[in-house]
Amino acid sequence: MFTRLLLAICLVAPLTSAAQLPDFTDLVEREGPSVVNISTTQSVRNPLLPQIPNLQEDDPFYEFFRRFMPEPGPREFQSQSLGSGFIISPDGYILTNAHVVQSAEEITVKLNDKREFKAKVIGADRRVDLALIKIEGAGLPAVKFGDPSKLKVGEWVVAIGSPFGFENSVTAGIVSAKGRSLPQENYVPFIQTDVAVNPGNSGGPLFNLKGEVVGINSQIYSRTGGFMGLSFAIPIDVANEVAQQLRTTGKVTRGRIGVVIQPLTKELVESFGLPSVRGALVNSVEKGGPAEKAGIEPGDVILRFNGKIVNSSEDLPRIVGATKPGSGVTIQIWRNKALRDVQVTVGQMADERTARAGPPGGPRQGPAQTQYGLTLSDLSEAQRGELKISGGVLVENVQGAAVRAGVRRGDVILAINNQDVPSVDQFNQIMAQFDKGRTVALLIRRGPNSLYVPFRVETN
């Protein structure tokens, strides 16, 4: 009797479990027509074109090149690429990734019902990899937007797109994480999923189970070029803000305040006397920028911007970037173990410029001295002028605790716990004030950037 009962349970259990899985058929049937396939063509110069000299027929080498050099191919050829997108308004506005339509000379949009349209680019924003394109149509099926902030980790989501050109492919998975930061992506809190996304899915929608678009599939993490279980989508609220600006002006403007920031660590929190590991640490301030005019200094920790909490350094660029240039906002900072508010007028972000990098040149000012695992020397006037600083000491070599702290040869130490370091002698005097085992914050100039490094004081 017991054996029969156990067998019955084993047979029933999988059916009960399967019945609890979501059914995506209605969602796909209802929302699939709003997803489009995007193909582009562009002229690409032939990189293998042989370099045949331009010779006259009576030149002695003319016959040699004619007989032994291969026939030159076309100087340019047509390159094609595929991607996905989705209709956001019945009159034909479509969202996709900027890299899908980048450099395209011709864009063709194919609908679910096989109709094809030529599209034009209204505007693109490479910083968040979004583009708004337009086809001429009316009564087109458009998606509904959801609220990414209501997404929960573990929630089911669905992607529809054209991986490898296979149109209207449907894949499903769950939300793996929210607010994910990626290298070189400062303005997007990505939604991470395990939905199968491959080349061709770029620009396609990510739906929740209500059939609302919550994200735009944009990137994958892969060591092979194919899907490995890590895909990233741009939240639709971020995309919609960009789309509105592109539709209105054809470009996107972002706010800036002119600071360089870095993450807080447990050691830096201790050295600054912060109550928690929260905020963005300012390691340098642009001369003449909005932050300097407002009185913000290196070593300040920004905790709130315009009333919004800054939980980590990744939050600040997104919050500031979304603020309208010219706006007056309040910034809450932590300085000298106390809270204070400063008022700043947000500037407008300009095109990125390449800053000069590399260690300072010029002769050394004085003999090098070794202490605390650091071989230091005073900077010459030429070196200070090149770096546009008034003080600091040059790190000639590192060992022991300095290596473990992350200090590098060629760094310039500007300050210790926000006390300026004009010379090696002053460095030694400041360090002598701290007990062994104390962690201090070294403000370091490295190339064109500055950063704070937590440094544990050991016996000299």
Image: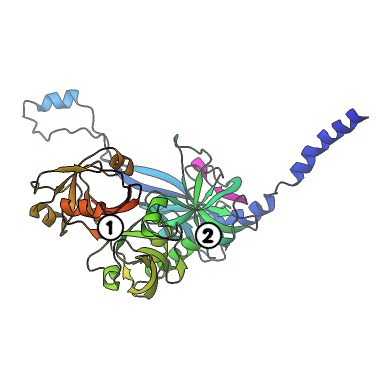
Q: Quadrant of residue 319?
A: bottom left
Residue named by callout 1: 352
Q: Residue at x 25, y 52 (%)?
A: 432
**Residue type at mark 1?**
Glu
Residue named by callout 2: 87
- Whether residue 43 is in magenta: the answer is no
Q: From the image, which quarter does the C terminus lie in?
A: top left
Query: Label 2: few (<14), some or many (≥20) within 10 Å?
Result: many
Side of 325 where 32 appears, left or right:
right
Side of 283 where 280 appears, left or right:
right
Residue 158 in the image: x percent, y percent? 60, 50
- Between the residue at mark 2 and the residue at mark 1, the CA separation in whole angstroms equals 32 Å
Residue 236 in the image: x percent, y percent? 51, 60
11 up-or-down from 126: above or below:
above
- Whether residue 157 is in magenta: the answer is yes
Q: Nearer the viewer, residue 460 or 195?
A: 460
**Residue type at mark 2?**
Ile
Which type of secondary structure does the marked residue at label 2 adopt?
Answer: strand
Q: Quadrant of residue 90?
A: bottom right
Query: Label 1: few (<14), some or many (≥20) within 10 Å?
Result: few
Q: Which residues are magenta?
A: 152-166
Q: From the image, which quarter does the N terminus lie in?
A: top right
